[in-house]
Image: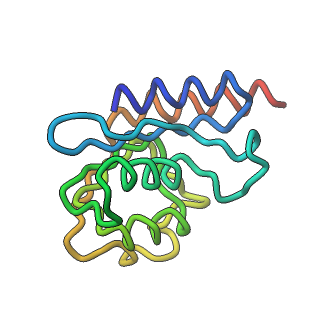
Amino acid sequence: MQAALAEARLAALDGEIPVGAVIVAGGRIIARTHNLTERLCDVTAHAEMQAITAASMALGGKYLNNATLYVTLEPCVMCAGAIAWSQMGRLVYGASDPKRGFTRYASDILHPRTQVTTGVLAEEAAQLMQQFFQAKR
């Protein structure tokens, strides 16, 4: 999760909402990214989407059932759908997102075998978000 937080900090420096994601498989990071929605002018360029694409390319396949996605903020419904379609083995996220997080809308959207761990370094992740939006106001 520390690597995901580092990515979130990079996002904030680029003027992106500070969400970072890494995917680990076989004991090593195979994807590392952050939100790119502003840079790419693409509302789908969330950190999780970018990480899933990079990890699939790294592994040479679309299914990530032996991988773990670490993301600093609870995924939205769109990202949760992509996590489900990739059959991600494990999802670990930091801060909850009560406004746009997937658990508010569709808590059963993930693949049935995906293990979920929440609240990992949640305070640090939430603080990054708060600082980012305070600076914007």
Using the image as rendered, state which of residue 90 and residue 94 is in the foreground.
90
- Position of 123 relative to 111 (above/below): above
Residue drawn 62% across the image and 30% down it: 11
Residue drawn 59% across the image and 61% down it: 100
Q: Position of residue 82 (x, y in %)?
A: 46, 67
Q: Quadrant of the N terminus?
A: top left
Using the image as rendered, state which of residue 50 and residue 130 is in the foreground.
50
Q: Quadrant of the C terminus?
A: top right
Using the image as rendered, state which of residue 101 and residue 23 is in the foreground.
23
Q: Where is residue 47 in the image (x, y as percent from the top left)?
A: 53, 46
Residue drawn 56% across the image and 28% down it: 128
Q: Position of residue 36 (x, y in %)?
A: 65, 42
Residue drawn 52% across the image and 35% down it: 126
In the rendered image, the residue lying farthest to the left is 26
Horizontal side of 40 relative to 137 (left or right) equals: left
Q: Position of residue 67 (x, y in %)?
A: 24, 52
- Position of 8 relative to 67 (above/below): above
> Which of the 4 image quadrants contains residue 38?
top right
Colour setting:
rainbow
In the rendered image, the residue lying farthest to the front is 60
> Which of the 4 image quadrants contains residue 115?
bottom left
